[in-house]
């Protein structure tokens, strides 16, 4: 099972069952943080249950920072970061981690790129040294870059092209964002992936990879006093460099509801999804973000939530129904709905059911009891989040890389607790605007 | 905004391997006043309790024609019990943030909960209710059945699921391991409440449970709660015997034609069970050939040639049989090249064994990485149950590393030669592979 972590890690993020709460005033992870002279921020979360640490480096760049025509380069470089430095041979990074009993991996999203290792606590210095090395000393040649380009093309086939749901999702994103770069898939459009070169990769590396554009998060059986000298020794010697501004275009006003449909011979089970442009923690009407988290919990927090209870249990027209809010972004977030019909029921009936629930929400709002229950569940999730080592490192790394503060993460339970009925209703009215939406239908090819 | 792409993909089709590392997790054996045993790692750091239970007798012990029964029955155990109908039961769980689950595997049924300490009374009593008084109300049964039927349809959309079903069926043609735990549309349609009640009733018994607990609870308190948790269960289980089996692998290639750009390939041959004295030797060889970066298959297929994003091989050990199993996804035009490389590396390992460096690296990985899986309370509790299931002893965590280190190069060469057999290696390919000739039809396929 070595090395095969999940490629969708972000589902644990704040809001989808991630984070904090107890008494509303308690801190969540109680991280300690310091910043080196070269601008690298280091965050430490102590957890001494087992003698293990997770070490992560998050870079403040992702696929949404790519130039036109170079889609996929952020993710391609992530792969190439394992292909050697001035002192390590291609592939040696992971091999050294493994032979020290550790696991490593990396992932790329629209706004960030992260690398991590989980190792015994006494091997922390080793992985810090290697991670600092490849922050400054990456070495790439066509000999290793070109086969790796074939690997990402296979990755695209496996993760997108072989999966009708993923194909539709890619089309929906391209329809959701008229101009903002989230419309381009992280892995890239195939025609552009094929043209990416060693020079493209090195240019990307030179542009974004520097200590002053990164955050190190370490969680586990270690103290901040132990980490500080190691950070200074290894990361401290990496020189600060000028980092270009992230140049994100504005999303223009969205003025027409979009509807797309894919008929696919591979599909056996139809489904419908609807997504609305929404504020994120950084973009748009950010005052709605916590209300949207509570709203998503009311609509979709388990089998007693509104959508499941109505469509799956009471009306018995769907096998699944839910909603989500994703505000983990520098640019626009999204609020979405999805469902799939019971055998013998048309997908349109499920869509109508979702529409009816949205209409009811906009007309009648939510109840105090629903709000109280949702807050209670969200706040309990913060206690459970502390139970793991990797979880807190992921949450903090993502939040900080996306421009939130430690204080934002630590006060999450209080902010959830402070959400009012009026705020939820205002957030719902602000976001659930048909002109800001895309509806996607996936259906089987009719048999004739 | 939650999508990310990563260097490696989760290997989906492997049975979880049992492997544990060695260091100081303090496991206590707790025996209740009524004689029920549990293993406990007491840890008051966070106000959380995680409990896991396993019962022998999973989907492989389903009656013929009732495939899917274990899955449907366990799905319904959180859909109402005692006086609480499905929504009332789920509401109680949700309001108290208790996650309670039941699930099934080929060899066993599992159950567990995770709760805040302050809600432990309700967590124990709701699990007790689910164990002893499940309702199986008709609307809930209809709903869960429809969800299973849709799950079966979705399997037909996924090349990996299509390949897996055919692969297991080909490996175990005359044995329940060859049936899919998710059943067939026909079998799922025919399952009744009486089937489910009987299935559960024969397995949930006091002599058939293994318990692991982690978190904020004392041994004394746990002991008392165990008696209440399992009160009312019969003394003895009554489970049909599942026969021992050797997988049937004769070196065939099966092709299931699908119009997709990348072929999904599963391959396998016989393996060894956890109880086999060579278990760790085979685990080490599995790491050497297919364990990930640095392994021979990844090196040859991914790193040197870019033929695949994911390639993996390793041991899948069940209670009554075992396989070495692997997977690779390759563009249709290059599938035959990937298959040749798998065969070539398989033969080379058999002939030459591993190098000293490979042996050392694999041992270091297997001993060290075990701890990394113990990332939260529920995972530690599951591990406590797994150690009991395999009868490895409460000191297993202290012994495990030494047992791995004790494997010699002579052991590895002997096992590589005797077990790894490229001619027996059997492939199921789903896609439109070029240059690959099927030697027999895949089970359940027309051509």
Image (spheres, rainbow, N blue to C red):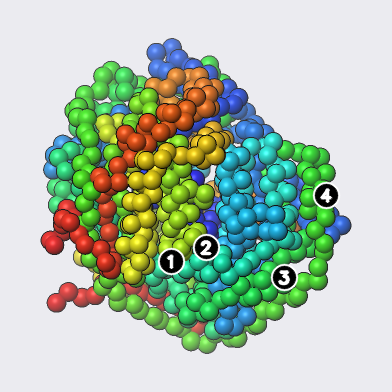
Dot 3 or dot 4: first in sequence order is 3
Residue under pointer 3: A206
Q: Distance between the residues labelled 1 and 3?
A: 26 Å
Residue at 34% over, 77% down: A262
Q: How far apart are marks 4 and 1 (CA)?
A: 39 Å
Q: Which quarter of the rendering shows the N terminus of chain B?
A: bottom right
- The residue pinned by badge 2 equals B5
N-terminal-most mark, 4 or 1? 1
**Element under disc 2:** strand
Where does the C terminus of chain B fall, quadrant-wise? bottom left
Mark 1 nearby-residue class (10 Å; few <14, some 14–19, many ≥20): many
Residue A217 position, x and y percent, is 70, 51
Q: Which residue position is annotated with label 1?
A: A154
Left or right: where B181 falls relative to B95? left
Given residues B327 and B161, the one toward you in this image is B327
- Label 4 chain ID: A
Which badge, 1 or 3, is on the more N-terminal residue? 1
Q: Residue beneath label 4, please?
A: A232
Pointer 3 and pointer 4 on the same chain: yes
Crowdedness near tag 4: few (<14), some (14–19) or many (≥20) residues, C-alpha within 10 Å: some
């Amino acid at each position: 099972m070595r090395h095969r972590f999940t490629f969708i890690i972000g589902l644990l993020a704040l809001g989808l069952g991630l984070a904090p709460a107890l008494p509303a005033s308690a801190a969540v992870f109680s991280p300690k943080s310091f910043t080196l002279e070269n601008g690298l921020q280091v965050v430490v979360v102590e957890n001494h249950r087992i003698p293990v640490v997770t070490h992560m480096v998050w870079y403040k760049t992702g696929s949404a920072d790519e130039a036109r025509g170079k889609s996929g380069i952020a993710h391609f470089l992530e792969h190439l970061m394992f292909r050697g430095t001035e002192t390590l041979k291609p592939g040696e990074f992971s091999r050294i981690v493994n032979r020290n009993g550790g696991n490593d991996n990396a992932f790329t999203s629209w706004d960030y790129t992260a690398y991590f290792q989980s190792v015994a606590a006494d091997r922390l210095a080793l992985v810090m040294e290697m991670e600092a090395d490849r922050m400054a000393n990456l070495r790439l040649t066509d000999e290793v870059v070109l086969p790796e380009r074939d690997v990402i093309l296979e990755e695209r086939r496996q993760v997108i092209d072989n999966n009708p749901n993923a194909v539709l999702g890619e089309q929906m994103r391209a329809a959701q964002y008229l101009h903002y770069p989230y419309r381009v898939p992280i892995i890239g459009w195939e025609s552009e992936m094929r043209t990416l070169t060693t020079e493209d990769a090195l240019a990307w590396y030179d542009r974004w990879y520097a200590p002053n554009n990164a955050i190190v998060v370490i969680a586990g059986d270690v103290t901040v006093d132990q980490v500080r000298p190691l950070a200074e020794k290894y990361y401290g010697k990496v020189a600060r460099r000028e980092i270009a501004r992230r140049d994100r275009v504005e999303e223009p006003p969205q003025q027409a509801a979009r509807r797309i449909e894919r008929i696919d011979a591979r599909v056996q089970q139809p489904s419908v999804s609807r997504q609305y442009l929404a504020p994120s923690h950084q973009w748009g009407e950010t005052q709605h973000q916590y209300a949207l988290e509570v709203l998503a919990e009311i609509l979709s927090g388990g089998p007693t939530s509104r959508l499941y209870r109505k469509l799956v249990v009471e009306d018995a027209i769907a096998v699944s129904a839910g909603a989500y809010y994703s505000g983990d972004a520098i640019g626009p977030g999204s609020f979405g709905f999805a469902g799939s019909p019971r055998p013998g029921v048309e997908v349109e009936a499920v869509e109508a059911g979702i529409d009816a629930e949205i209409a009811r929400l906009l007309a009648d709002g939510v109840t105090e009891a629903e709000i109280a229950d949702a807050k209670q569940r969200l706040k309990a999730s913060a206690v459970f989040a502390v139970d793991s080592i990797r979880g807190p490192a992921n949450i903090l790394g993502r939040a900080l890389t996306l421009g939130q503060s430690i204080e934002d993460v630590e006060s999450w339970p209080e902010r959830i607790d402070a959400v009012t009925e009026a705020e939820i209703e205002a957030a719902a009215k602000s976001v659930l605007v048909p002109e800001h939406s895309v509806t996607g239908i996936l259906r089987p090819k009719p048999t004739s | 905004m939650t999508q990310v792409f990563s260097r490696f993909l989760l290997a989906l089709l492997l049975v979880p391997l049992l492997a544990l590392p060695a260091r100081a997790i303090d496991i206590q054996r707790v025996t209740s006043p009524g004689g029920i045993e549990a293993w406990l790692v007491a840890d008051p750091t966070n106000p959380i309790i995680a409990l896991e239970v396993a019962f022998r007798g999973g989907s492989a012990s389903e009656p013929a024609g009732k495939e899917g029964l274990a899955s449907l029955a366990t799905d319904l155990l959180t859909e109402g019990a005692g006086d609480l109908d499905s929504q009332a039961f789920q509401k109680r769980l949700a309001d108290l943030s208790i996650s309670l689950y039941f699930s099934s595997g080929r060899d066993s049924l599992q159950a567990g909960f995770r709760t805040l300490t302050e809600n432990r009374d309700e967590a124990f009593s709701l699990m007790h209710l689910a164990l002893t008084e499940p309702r199986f109300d008709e609307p809930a049964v209809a709903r869960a059945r429809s969800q299973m039927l849709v799950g079966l349809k979705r399997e037909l959309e996924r090349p990996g699921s299509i390949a897996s079903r055919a692969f297991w069926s080909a490996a175990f043609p005359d044995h329940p391991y060859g049936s899919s735990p998710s059943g067939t549309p026909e079998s799922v349609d025919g399952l009744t409440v009486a089937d489910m009640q009987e299935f559960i009733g024969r397995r949930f018994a006091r002599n058939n449970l293994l318990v692991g607990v982690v978190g904020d609870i004392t041994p004394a308190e746990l002991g008392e709660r165990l008696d209440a948790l399992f009160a009312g269960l019969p003394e003895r289980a009554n489970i049909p015997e599942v026969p021992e089996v050797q997988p049937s692998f004769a070196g065939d290639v099966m092709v299931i034609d699908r119009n997709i750009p990348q072929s999904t390939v599963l391959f396998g041959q016989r393996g060894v069970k956890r109880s086999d004295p060579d278990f760790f030797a085979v685990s080490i060889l599995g790491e050497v050939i297919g364990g990930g970066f640095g392994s021979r298959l990844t090196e040859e297929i991914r790193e040197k040639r870019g033929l695949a994003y994911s390639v993996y091989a390793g041991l899948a050990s069940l209670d009554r049989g075992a396989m070495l199993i692997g997977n690779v996804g390759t563009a249709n035009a290059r599938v035959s090249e990937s298959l040749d490389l798998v065969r070539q590396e398989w033969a080379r390992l058999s002939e030459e064994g591993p190098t000293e460096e490979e042996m050392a690296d694999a041992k270091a990985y297997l001993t060290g990485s075990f701890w990394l899986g113990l990332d939260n309370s529920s995972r530690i509790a599951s591990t406590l149950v797994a150690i009991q299931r395999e009868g490895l002893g409460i000191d297993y965590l202290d012994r495990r590393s030494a047992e791995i280190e004790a494997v010699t190069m002579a052991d590895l060469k002997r096992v590589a030669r005797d077990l790894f057999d490229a001619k027996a290696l059997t492939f199921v390919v789903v896609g439109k592979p070029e240059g690959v000739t099927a030697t027999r039809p895949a089970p359940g396929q027309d051509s």
